[in-house]
Image: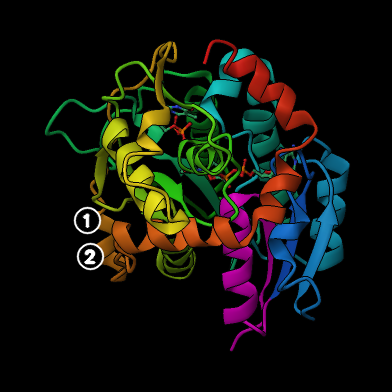
Amino acid sequence: MTKRNILITGGAGFIGSHVVRLFVNKYPSYLIVNLDKLTYAGNLENLKDVENKSNYHFAKGDILDVEFLYEVFKKHDIDGVIHLAAESHVDRSLHNPVEFASTNIIGTLNLLSAAQASWHSNYQGKVFYHISTDEVYGSAEHGIFFTEQTPIDPRSPYSASKASSDHFVNAYNNSYGLPTLISRCSNNYGPYHFPEKLIPLMINNILNSKSLPVYGKGENVRDWLFVEDHARAIDAIFHGGTSGQVYNIGGNNEWRNIDLVNFLCHTMDHKLGREEGTSARLITYVKDRPGHDLRYAIDASKLISETGWRPQVSFEVGLEMTVEWYLANQEWLRHVTSGEYLQYYAKMYQSS
Ligand code: NAD
Ligand code: TYD
């Protein structure tokens, strides 16, 4: 197998940790350098099982620190980048859009410029892969699916910052010939998901018999994909994607929030040996998120036809595995929900 030195940014976060784990285990001849600032969302506990592997290296640092990025490229002779580091939560972006612009746009630009400068326009065997989101397409009408041709129409500070970073990636491809890939995935769920996002927040609250805050009427629709399926898609695109192209990734698995929360309540009542209906009684409708996108729905046929990737984990199986993981890892949950999380929760859910 060829030797490659791959920089994965944001590898201590939710999706990044699954990508790091997959690459470290599947490609022993690669060096995987995980660059992460370890914000509230980054946690080295997510990578305990790979931290001592000889083909894994952790570099703590900030994608806003250009000098540091240049050093990392040089020191490890990086020839591939998989860029996941970002501020990722829509609700936080509504409170602090500048931080999102800074990390997601300027951070990506720094990384692009470090790759360009370090590779000296010798792009043979190089690739810069940017992990984006389906949210850049905006909200999908009933019956419509986002394709790679769907015009960009971001509607939250988070999605606006991600869309902007996508444009810079395309600009580096077009203007400087940098070999780039972009993928846009739907909502992920699974182990190590920070409990500010819908599914882990509800699991945590059900465990603690706290109210379950459903925004608005709970009618918003999301297309859910098990995180390991996303990691496998990233592997397929990194190794088989065509430079300059965008690939949509999705599970073809749409759920209204309220139906998903009810299904989760049912699953957890069963797992916890609680009477059916106990958890659903905790559901509380709260003030809607401002500008809340109604529906995301992905058409992943390009990825499927070009690489053969398909989701391997059904939602029923994936959700059950996820619940079991959280029940078995309550220590992890306790660690990440102490300190700053408590202040965040108090601020965001004042009225619930
Ligand atoms: P996350 O918030 O769990 O992790 C983000 C990681 O980036 C953390 O480890 C954090 O410490 C790190 N980070 C943040 N700012 C940094 C900085 N300035 N320098 C270095 N590291 C920094 O996010 P996630 O859910 O794992 O998402 C990863 C990527 O996938 C993001 O780019 C996101 O936009 C994209 N994405 C997420 C989803 C989803 O459902 N979660 C869906 C599609 C795309
Ligand atoms: P989230 O997990 O934040 O992902 P995104 O906004 O990126 O899709 O939210 C998923 C859906 O769940 C979204 O429609 C907002 C809704 N939601 C709630 O109803 N209550 C909550 O407490 C949270 C965090 C989200």
In the image, the segment drawn in magenta is: 1-30
Secondary structure under tag 2 reads helix
Check the picture and name the quadrant holding the N terminus: bottom right
* Residue 246 visible in the snapshot: no
Q: Is residue 247 left or right of residue 16?
A: left
- Residue at point 32% right, 39% down? 277
Q: How many marks?
A: 2
Q: Amino acid at mark 2?
A: Ser
Find out whether residue 262 is within the magenta segment. Answer: no
* Residue 332 visible in the snapshot: yes
Contact? badges 2 and 1 (CB < 8 Å): yes
Task: Point out the residue furthest to the bottom here.
Answer: 1
Q: Kindly identify which numbered label has been placed on residue 70.
A: none
Q: Is residue 55 placed above or below 74 in the rendered structure?
A: below
The residue identified by callout 2 is 305
Q: Quadrant of residue 4?
A: bottom right
Find out whether residue 4 is within the magenta segment. Answer: yes
Q: Amino acid at mark 1?
A: Ser
The residue identified by callout 1 is 301
Q: Percent position (x, y) of residue 304?
A: 26, 63
- Residue at point 34% right, 64% down? 317
Task: Point out the residue furthest to the front here.
Answer: 275
Q: Percent position (x, y) of residue 143?
A: 11, 33
Q: Is residue 111 placed above or below 342 in the rendered structure?
A: below
Secondary structure under tag 1 reads helix
Question: Pointer 2: residues within 10 angstroms few (<14), some, or many (20+)?
Answer: few
Residue labelled 2 has its Cβ within 8 Å of some atom of ligand 1: no
Q: Nearer the viewer, residue 185 or 76?
A: 185
Q: Is residue 92 left or right of residue 320?
A: right
Q: Percent position (x, y) of residue 64?
A: 78, 35
